[in-house]
Every structure is written in structure tokens, then in C-alpha cells.
Amino acid sequence: MTLRSVSFFCCALLWGATEVVAQDVPTLTFEERLGAYDKSEGLTEPSGLSTGHTVPFWTVSDDHPFVLGLDVKGTVVTVIPLGKGVHDLEGVIEDTARARLLVVSEKKTEITSIDLNDLSEISRYPLSEMGGFSKLLSDFDTNWKKNGLEGITVAPETGTIYVIKEREPRMIIAISADLSTILSIEMLGRDAGLISPRKNDRKMDISGIASDPSRDGQWILSDTDQAVFFRDLQDGTVYRYPLSWMSESGLQHVSNPEGVALSADGTELFIITDNGKDSALFRYDIQ
């Protein structure tokens, strides 16, 4: 059975989609695996991924305070230092329309913005200083320093920024394009369709997110579930795709997936893993 048929079968089985028309459901086909580890350049713990305009990919490593630009082979070609006080980076997105990089810090609970026209222009935006943060805390009694922010994406058409909280509870937070206001919060629990057959709900996490404007949806990654979910924003339907790849010895699970990104034309999905010297960049075709 090919990865594509496995993916579709899992979707129909898990979500009760007994009458799903195959061409209406995105399918993933494994295409390539590349190494994504370079201790000399600080690429040691990949923890976020974005496609880019000036470089093919951006990533962050949560043990270093800088953003790394990668070429199509996963080799580091650009390093952007973020300065003191920026650490524990868990997600990155290039906001091409606004010529900036946005990076999320888990323990700081903040977003750092880097001007792509002047890389020395770096600004930090703690969520605690945004409008709406107090209501968020009153609605959800949670420890933001634990199981905190993990991924970030931007809706290209509106500029709305989405950040995700890993777990306890899992949630998605919408933030205004100017980084001044928390617009909305949404739980990403079982009721939202994020269900794992491998982990109980409390232990399941979310580790990355990517907007998909061509399908009006979002790709949401889970490290513990070793899967990516496609979330249809029109009707709320969620499809689960177990992540696998074909090695010389056979079909393998993708271990420790930490970042997800989409090609500009929406035809390819990329996953980066934090797996020590075996960290890798995976490419899947979407049909």
C-alpha cells in the first residue's frame, strides 16, 4: 500500500468520512529526505520551519538565538543573530507580504519580528503586553511557561498571525498583523477533531502549523502523534496523515517532527525533525 492510500484510508477511518470523494481530500506522497544537522552552524535542534522568498527555507534551533536560512538541500546558507534575551525558539514564518520574519519563543511567550529589508531592525512583542491577554488568562487557567508556544504561521490574505500552544491545553491564538492585539483563541482538543490513536488526549501535543490559502485550511503537526493534520477552515473537517518515509530498509515513521511548511504554490509539504544527528528535512507532494 502506498503512502497516499494509507493517508486516505486513515482519514476516512478516523473521521467517519464514509462518503468522502477522494479528489476532494488532500493526499500526501513521500518524495525526499535530506539531512538537517550541522553543529558548526548551530543547526542542532531544528524546531520550526518556513519556506522563504530570499532563501528556500528558514528554521530555528531552540538552543541558539538566531534564525537559519537553508538551501534546497538543507544546508545552512544564512545566519541571522537575534541578540541577547531571545532564546528557546520554537517556530518561524516568513511574512513575505510585509517583508519580515516572525519567530516565536516558548519560555518568553513572545514573538520576535525581523525586518527583511534591514536585518538589524529586530522588535520583540510579548503576548502579555498585547490587548486581550488578560482575558485569555482568565478563560484558560494554564501555566504559560510549561508546554508553551510552539509554532507560528500567517494568513497571507489578512496578515493575521496564528501561534499554537503545545498542550495542557492545546490551543491556537490569533493575533493582529500589527502584533498589538489577541483577536481570538480556540481550543484544539478532541472536539476540534485533533485525535490521536497513539496517545491519550492529555499527552498529545501540537508542534507546528502552516497556513494553506489555496485550500482554505491549516496543516497542524504533532510530534507525539508522528502525524500531520489538515484542518478545513470552511467546514471544520480534520484529516489525519501518519508521517512515514521509505528508507532502504523499508517504511519508517518520522520521529520527532517539529516544524511544518508549505510551498508557495501549495503543491509540496515540508517537515523538519529534531532528532539529533539524524535530524532531517522531508518533502511530500500534495494532491
Image (spheres, grey):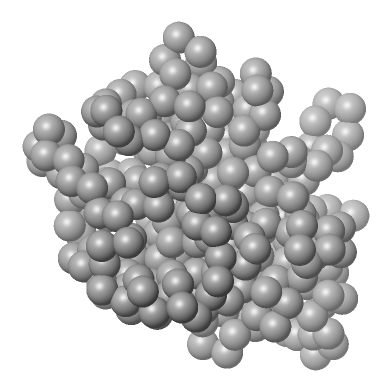
Choose between 97 and 120: the one closer to the eye: 120
Residue at 83% in and 38% down: 252
Q: Is residue 143 visible?
A: yes
Where residue 260 sits in the image (x, y, percent)?
Answer: 53, 50
Residue at 36% in and 29% down: 65
Where residue 137 sits in the image (x, y, percent)?
Answer: 45, 72
Quadrant of the rendered image containing residue 175: bottom left
Q: Is the residue 9 above or below the residue 3 in the image? A: below
Residue farthest to the top? 40
Residue at 55% in and 59% down: 143
Q: Indicate left or right for 36 with 136 as reference.
A: right
Figure disc tally: 0
Quadrant of the rendered image containing residue 115: top left
Where residue 283 sits in the image (x, y, percent)?
Answer: 59, 43
The C terminus appears in which quarter of the rendering? Answer: bottom right
Where residue 169 sits in the image (x, y, percent)?
Answer: 62, 67
The N terminus appears in which quarter of the rendering? Answer: bottom right
Q: Is residue 270 visible?
A: no
Residue at 32% in and 35% down: 86
Choose between 153 and 262: the one closer to the eye: 153
